[in-house]
């Protein structure tokens, strides 16, 4: 668990054979990724949960859906960007995520938690931030400085996870959930023109809108990139959209610009 872009998917790809989508923008992961990790003769299943944000316990950023997946785990590996690549405060981020866990579920907040201080390779040898974090939380949590880029402390992390799991009582089997296969095609979209407004709709838009927080600059940038990658931008141009024209996507309206 952790904020978007702290390295959760990359860590999963390095500890398991899973191949999650990894990119240098927020909200790359929109659904949990699973992988099996091994240490010695022990295997365990890891789930990379999409980035949580402040307000997740109230449903912001699909918080309910993501936290529901977190509830099904036996322990938490809380990933923190100790280098503060996005200008964020690692200590503040750690507090925010734990508060969201507590708001959502008291029992979830009490789950065993290992803290991974990722991206130590970007600290250029200055471990001041690591020491500050250790001083603040070292007496309460097991904290492991780590680098998903260089794999520094990979074996220590795997060993710590296995040892922690061995001390946790297995979860009771969950009641089987009944579900139907979603057969929608999330590459499909259509564009119509209504009273001078270009209206974009379809399964692609339904899927995209539900995972986007337009108030977040990084999320909005990702939203705009997806419109380009999926062909929406080119289709609008083919239909004659011009600078300043209104484009409606879901419940939102935007002015078109190149």
Image (tube, rainbow, N blue to C red):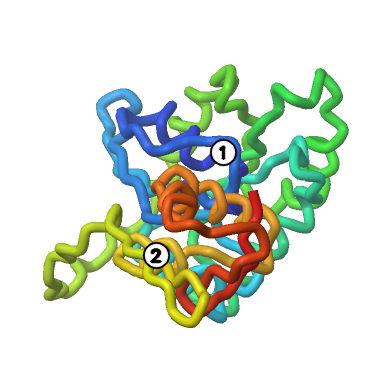
Mark 1 secondary-structure assignment = loop
The correct choice, above or below, for 160 with respect to 64 in the image is: above
Q: Position of residue 252 (x, y in %)?
A: 55, 75
Left or right of 172 on screen, residue 53: right
The correct choice, above or below, for 179 with respect to 135 in the image is: below
64 and 204: which is toward the camera: 204
Mark 2 secondary-structure assignment = helix
Q: Residue at x 20, y 63 (%)?
A: 184
Dot 2, crowdedness within 10 Å: few (<14), some or many (≥20)? many
Which disc is residue 7 wearing? 1
- Callout 1 touching callout 2 (CB < 8 Å): no
The correct choice, above or below, for 248 with respect to 231 in the image is: below
Q: Position of residue 23 (x, y in %)?
A: 52, 36
Disc 2 designates what residue? Answer: 205
Dot 1, crowdedness within 10 Å: few (<14), some or many (≥20)? many
Residue at mark 1 to residue at mark 2: CA–CA distance: 27 Å
Quadrant of the image occupied by residue 84 = top right
Left or right of 100 on screen, residue 22: left
């Amino acid at each position: 668990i952790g904020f978007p872009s702290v390295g959760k998917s990359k860590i999963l790809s390095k500890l398991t054979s899973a191949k999650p989508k990894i990119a240098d923008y927020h909200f790359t992961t929109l659904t949990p990724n699973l992988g099996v990790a091994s240490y010695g003769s022990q295997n365990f299943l890891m789930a990379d949960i999409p980035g949580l944000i402040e307000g997740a316990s109230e449903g912001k950023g699909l918080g309910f859906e993501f936290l529901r997946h977190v509830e099904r785990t036996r322990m938490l590996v809380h990933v923190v960007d100790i280098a503060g690549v996005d200008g964020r405060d690692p200590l503040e981020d750690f507090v925010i995520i734990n508060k969201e866990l507590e708001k959502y579920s008291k029992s979830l907040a009490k789950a065993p938690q290992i803290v991974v201080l990722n991206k130590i390779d970007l600290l250029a040898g200055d471990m001041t931030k690591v020491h500050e974090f250790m001083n603040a939380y070292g007496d309460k949590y097991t904290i492991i400085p780590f680098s998903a880029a260089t794999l520094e402390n990979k074996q220590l992390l795997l060993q710590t996870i296995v040892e922690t799991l061995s001390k946790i009582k297995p979860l009771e089997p969950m009641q089987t959930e009944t579900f139907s296969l979603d057969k929608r095609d999330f590459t499909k979209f259509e564009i119509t023109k209504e009273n001078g407004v270009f209206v974009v709709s379809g399964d692609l838009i339904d899927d995209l809108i539900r995972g986007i927080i337009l108030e977040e600059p990084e999320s909005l940038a990702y939203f705009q990139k997806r419109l380009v990658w999926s062909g929406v931008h080119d289709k609008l141009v083919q239909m004659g959209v011009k600078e300043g024209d209104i484009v409606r996507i879901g419940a939102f309206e935007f002015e078109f610009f190149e």
